[in-house]
Every structure is written in C-alpha cells, then in structure tokens.
Amino acid sequence: MTDVPQTRDLADADVALAAAPESTTDSPPGHSRLGWALVLISVAQLMVVLDATIANIALPYIGADLNIDAANLTWIVTGYALAFGGLLLLGGRLGDLYGRRRVFMAGLATFAVASLLGGLATNEGLLLGARGLQGLGAALASPAALALITTTFPAGPARNRAFAVYAAMSGAGAAVGLILGGWLTGTDSFLGLFDVDGWRMTFLINVPIGLAAAALAPRFLPESESHPGQLDVPGAITGTLGLLGLVYGFSRAGEADHGWGDTWTIASLAGGAALLAVFGFVEARVAHPLLPIRVFANRTRATSFGVMALVPAAMFAMFYFLSLFIQQVVGYSPLTTGFAFLPFSLGIVFGAGLSSNLVNRIDPRWLAGVGTLMAMVALVGFSRLSVPDSTADLLAVTADNPLGEGVNYWTSIFPFIVLMAVGMGAVFVPLTLTAVHHLRPEEAGIGSGVLNTMQQVGGALGLAILSTVALNAGDEKATRIAGELGAQGASPEAIGKLAFLGSFTDGATAAFLVGAGLILVGSVATWLFLNVKHEELATDGPEAAPVHIG
C-alpha cells in the first residue's frame, strides 16, 4: 500500500470542490491594496476589542448622570461581553454563508449605530440595549475580519505580518481602551462640533470610525463566495443560547454579590452546558453544521483553540486586578492608570512584529512555548506585590497618602507589564496562524469564530475563577481588619473602605499566582501537542490527509 497525500479523504464526495480555490465575486486586491486592506481590518478589530474596556473608567460618571445603581452598572461591561461572546460562532458562520465582506460591513455599521445610540442614551435601558447591540456588531465583524486576512493575504510572510498586526490590535486593545477611556472621559465636545458629557465620547468616537471603515471595505477587500440556504438553524439556536448561558454564568459567578453558589449562576451554567450538549448532538447529524466537528479533529488546531482560551483567561485578569490595584491602592488617577498600561500596548506590538518575522524560520511550538513562559513569569512577578497593611497604616490613609504610596512603578510593575506584553505577542501570532491554518476555504469564518469564542469565553471563565480566588484569599484578612478597626472606634464607612484596601492586595496577588498556573497549563500543552512545522505555514489549501490505495 502507498500513502498518497490528498486535499481531503476520498470518502468525501466533493474532493474537487474543496481542493479548488474559493471563488470570489470580486478579484482579490492587488499588492498595492493589501496595506489598506490591513488598515481597515486592524481598525475594526481594535475598535471592537478596546470597547470592552473603554467604558470602564467612565462608569462612575455614567452611573451619576443616568442614575444607574452599582449593581446594574456592571452590566454596561457585562452586557457587551455577553452579546459578543455568545454570538461569535453565529457571526463567523454567517460570514461563510453570505459573504465575509458583506457581514464585516454589516457588523461595522451595526456597531457604529449602536455606539451612536449609546452616546445619546438618556436612560439605563437604552444604554444597556445599545451595549448589547454593540456586542452583536462586534460578533459579526470580528470573525469576518480574521477570515478576511486568511483569504486576502497569500500564505507566507505577507499573511504572517498581517496576523501579527491583527494579534497586536487584539492584545493592545484593552490597554488602549483604558488610555482612551481616561482621556475621552475628560473631554467636553464631540470633534469640537458641540458640547457633550465626556463619558458619551467613549461611545460617539466609534461612529465616524465604524461608518468610514464600512464604506471603504468594498474598495479594498474582496468578497467571498456565498452559500445562502445552508444556515443550520437548530445549531444556531442551541449554540448561541448555550454560549450566552455560559458567558452569563461565568460573568455572574465573578461578581461579589452573586458568586458560584447563586441560584441564577448555577442555572445559567447548567442550562448553557445542556444546550451545548444538544448543540454537539445536532452538529454531528446535520448536512451543513454551524460548527463542523472536524474543525477540532486536527491536534494542532485543537491545541491552539485550547491555549487561546487559557491565555486570555490570565491576561484579562491581569488587566482587571492590576488596574484596580494601581488606582485604589497605589492612588493613580484614571488617566494616569491608563498610561501605566501604555508599555503593554507597545510591548505587544513589538512582540507580535518579532514573532511574525521569526515564525517564517522557527516552529510555532518554540515561539508560543517561550511566550507562555514569559507571561507566566510576569504573573508570578505581579503576585509578589505587597503593601503595608497594619491598622495604623490603614488609619493613616488619605488621598495624599495612599496605602500603596511606597510601591515603585518602575521596579515593581513596569518590568512585568513589558514581559507580559512581549510574551503575549509571541503567543498570539503563531497560535492565530495554527488555529486557522489548512481549514477549508468555506470554513475560514467559522474557524475564526471558534478562535474568538475561545478567547471571550476563556476570558469570562478566567475572570470569574480568579475573582473567586481573590475574594476567598482576602476574606479572612478583611474580617480581621474590620474587627481591629471597630475596636478602635472607626466608622462603618471607614471600616468598609479600609478593610477592602487592606485585603485587596492579598486577594489580587493570589489571583495572579493562580493565573500563572493557568498559563503554565497552556505552556505545557503547547510544548507537547503543537507539532506543526514553520514550513507548513507557508502553504495554502485544506490540510493534507494520507489516503491508502490498495
């Protein structure tokens, strides 16, 4: 018997179709247009990623202006993540079926309109609805953007560089969001045309950018072949609702007021898991599945998806706990806090650029493996942060004398932010390449959707787990500090605030350490199972499969 490589197993009836390049309704852009195509895709990706954090700094101003209580205020962030994470699979598949450029444009237009509604919102309901609509737009645009890179840029150095820029935008978006949010919150006009509350600018800034990117897309991006009538409706319903249930449950579990024992948390997680089980059953039996199970059959691809769920789980937690530590314990202003994360944006751009050049000569396993180890060391470094927390130190805390005044940013925080950023750049580029490499052309969108879903759900799960770790780690110290302060006659308001300050560092550093453990698991999986060679990344087309001929 002889092993003959084929583009697909001969048991599949449509070998010729899969082997042929995907037809397009437009010719692919020439070399001179590839740069502008990448600009459009990168701007869109940066916009949808940074919107997960850009409103964070503005939350107190939004709450005061629209009279939203603290419990519902968190839904301004959670509502976006819920719609974004829950609808990604559907968004990726719609791009495959109805044309990726068309869905990309629809996503950007939806995002821009939703941003306008959010910026003009006069009450809580309209703002939360706008955030959900923004999540829908992001879920349509983001997987289409990644798939457009795969189908627009030729395999090899050009595609690797494009993925490096995409990865840099994905990783830097959260940090850019903090900086931009801090700056925009302090503004008082929209493009100098009319006066507007600063928090509204965090939404309105997206309107001209999103509409311009959508309008320019037909000029620089090719359209993909459409396959209308093949939408898996049962899979779309069960898969979308299942993901919504998981993202909601994980987000609720990470909130101090609810936690893992909350009835709605348990019901949401159980319901989401049950619906995803039904989804798996449906997908194995329908002719045109929303998520072809064979996407996970390749070990390297499955490893890439798994690691890309673990890495953001730790990275999102780093942003969350470190931004709170810098503001509430060290005493930085919101804008200064945003700029404290600027080295992360620069570092991940550097790491992604370096990785895109090296991935042409070095196997992805080595780049991603070293990157995960760098990120793990950074989180261990963050776990060593400490502040004085005696009762006397706490009672001396004022606006001019914060508890963490002695923490030196340049020696205790800056080196680990840079190490984390460069490590993330080294991870995102090779894993993004291996996650979508050798997928059939008609499945590029769903592969991109799976990758984005893993990041969003992984981030929600990681933040929920690490928030629980932080709460449990700080509970005992908070109780002790509260008792000591009460014995000294401190007011209930002071006891609550100082007990939180005194215990927060212990909780955050415990979360950083557990996050380092999550990264280590991802690193081990990378070293053991990511076995694709760098030469393979320079080839196009579906994955080769040996076929026995007797």
Image (cartoon, rainbow, N blue to C red):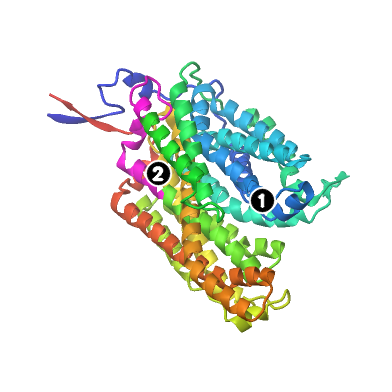
Residue 305 marker: 2
Q: Residue at x 71, y 62 (%)?
A: 335
Q: Is residue 380 above or below residue 233?
A: below
Say if the magenta span includes residue 294: yes
Residue 517, percent across and down?
Answer: 39, 61
Q: Which residues are magenta?
A: 281-307
In the structure shown, which secondary structural element does the residue marked by tag 2 occupy?
helix
Residue identified by numbered label 1: 54
Mark 2 and mark 1: Cα distance apart in space: 27 Å
Check the picture and name the quadrant holding the N terminus: top left
Which residue sits furthest top? Answer: 229
Tag in front: 2 or 1: 1
In the structure shown, which secondary structural element does the residue marked by tag 1 occupy?
loop
Q: On the picture, is 60 further left or further right than 3?
A: right
Q: On the picture, is 454 further left or further right than 328?
A: left
* Residue 398 figure quarter: bottom right
The total of numbered circles placed on residues is 2
Residue toward you, 68 or 295 = 68
Residue 52, percent across and down?
Answer: 61, 47
Give the amino acid type for the residue marked by disc 1 in the picture. Answer: Ile
Contact between marks 2 and 1 (CB within 8 A): the answer is no
- Asked whether residue 515 is in view, the answer is yes
Residue 451, percent across and down?
Answer: 45, 41
Q: On the picture, is 202 further left or further right than 521?
A: right
Q: Indicate which disc, 2 or 1, sits on the residue closer to the N terminus.
A: 1
Q: Is residue 479 above or below residue 84?
A: below
Give the amino acid type for the residue marked by disc 2 in the picture. Answer: Phe
Which residue sits furthest bottom? Answer: 392
Q: Residue at x 65, y 56 (%)?
A: 178
* Residue 400 figure quarter: bottom right
